[in-house]
Amino acid sequence: MAMAGLYRRLLPSPPCFDFASSHGKQLFVEGIQNGTMEGFYRLISYFQTQSEPAYCGLASLAMVLNALAIDPGRKWKGPWRWFDESMLDCCEPLEIVKARGITFGKLVCLAHCAGAKVEAFHASQSTINDFRKYVLKCSSSDDCHLISSYHRGALKQTGTGHFSPIGGYHVGKDMALILDVARFKYPPHWVPLTALWEGMNYIDESTGKSRGFMLISRPHTEPGMLYTLSCKHESWNSIAKFLMDDVPFLLKSEDVQDIYKVFSIIFTSLPSNFEEFIKWIAEIRRHEDGDSSLSEEEKTRLAVKEEVLRHVHETSLFKHVSSFLSSSCGRQTLTSGDGDALPVIAASVCCQGAEILGGKHSSPAVYCCPETCVKCWKAEDDKSITMVSGTVVNGNTEQGVDVLIPSSSGKLCCTCSSKKNIRMHPASSDVLTVLLLSLPSTTWDGITDEKLLKEIHDLVSHENLSTLLQEEVLHLRRQLHILKRCQEGKVDEDLQAPLS
């Protein structure tokens, strides 16, 4: 029986020239001699084929993020932290991307959420001379890479819109090397920069905007070491709107006279499922990954988390938030039940960890962690280490998972989850402090009492924060701006990096 299918496509030449052809090799050698193939080596080391016909954008971004050695902060499979297409689902569900691809603006959104530094331009808002300048910049360096969004028709190829990284540039011939992630269709190939520019000026019918290009580079510091915002939960739309729109309105409409009233207005109005929106970034590992001793990498990452947490606790805002939550008013307005109990949190994290370590994506209900044990010990440098161990059950299989807990006090002793009164990070006071610090500075402008307004500004001012905590807070603020753009459907209109 005959089976319909396609095996690759013939690369139209001209205007395209196969990278492996004699002409392609000559262009490559001359590019090396002229210093415009510097970005090629890291990109080719992480060159991948898109795993789905519509995953060209996700594959291009994963390839570039890995080439830049940006740590995703979460594990892919086994013990490995690595960017994979399946992990790039923040700004658009994978099911939708699989069915119809992703727009230029949402891929830019994904790059921001992944922690990269991004400069993005629609072709209609740039010029070919600017594009050429950026291609030359990224091709002459290995610390930034360029992804192009173009229409294949301009290159006489079959298909429509496509994403791929630019792997190099030939100044004399004015040609760019496209590392086509659809390797099942076309090999890497050289194209005239003018033809590629023409392809980027095609209008994307789904947005009504031209296509474009983005420069992606590493941030100065790793973002989101302790907290991150999640738009995987169905409620993120309403929560983003509440934080960016409703809170300023509530503060403006209410008669606010003291700081506790500000807290009361915000905290009593928080959506019930708010805890699904701001996430604690946990370090997990298998029991069999080693004994109780930590690797140098684990020690370093845990130390950074503890440093951030210590800086949170040292802020005046944290002391005010803690005082409010311990008051009768605070207990009435924000009842967390066992939500802050470390064993309860750890059991959930252990289940998630078992799923990630197993490389599976099942329903969380499939995993069960009936008991967790908190262990504390002194490391070789006399530093207290806290770890929660749990045995996760999935059907007939069991897996031991450890969660490393950042602590700013180190006053926890060994115990098991039958004791529900253990309180430690992440606690409501930690999360709410960071949340208030992350809100836009304009949030408080509606407060009419000048003395109170000054007090609020002094409490949330970034000038009084350590550099490490500033980076953490500004990362959350940028994420919040991006999610707001998603909520408003403006990611394809506004490509600029969110203001800090």
Image (spheres, grey):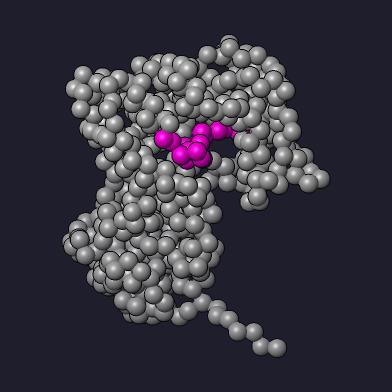
Above/below status of 268 relative to 479: above
Whether residue 451 appears in this view of the structure is: yes
Whether residue 69 appears in this view of the structure is: no
Instruction: Tell me residue 44's x, y (percent).
Output: 45, 56
From the viewer's perspective, is 48 left or right of 493? right
The residue drawn where x is 47% and y is 31% is 226
Residue 223 magenta-highlighted: no
Q: What stretch is highlighted in magenta?
A: 269-284
From the viewer's perspective, is 5 left or right of 314? right
Judged from this view, the residue extending furthest toward the right is 396
Quarter of the image that includes the C terminus: top left
Comparing 245 with 37, the one in front is 245
The residue drawn where x is 34% and y is 23% is 261
Comparing 181 with 359, the one in front is 359
From the viewer's perspective, is 353 left or right of 446? right
Comparing 265 with 464, the one in front is 265
Instruction: Tell me residue 404's x, y (percent).
Output: 60, 27
Instruction: Tell me residue 449's x, y (percent).
Output: 21, 23
Above/below status of 78 relative to 44: above
Q: Which quarter of the figure has residue 459?
A: top left
From the viewer's perspective, is 236 left or right of 287? left
The residue drawn where x is 78% and y is 46% is 395
Residue 270 magenta-highlighted: yes
Above/below status of 199 relative to 97: below
Judged from this view, the residue extending furthest toward the bottom is 1
Comparing 461 with 332, the one in front is 332
Quarter of the image that includes the N terminus: bottom right
The residue drawn where x is 40% and y is 16% is 319
Tell me how many marks there are: 0
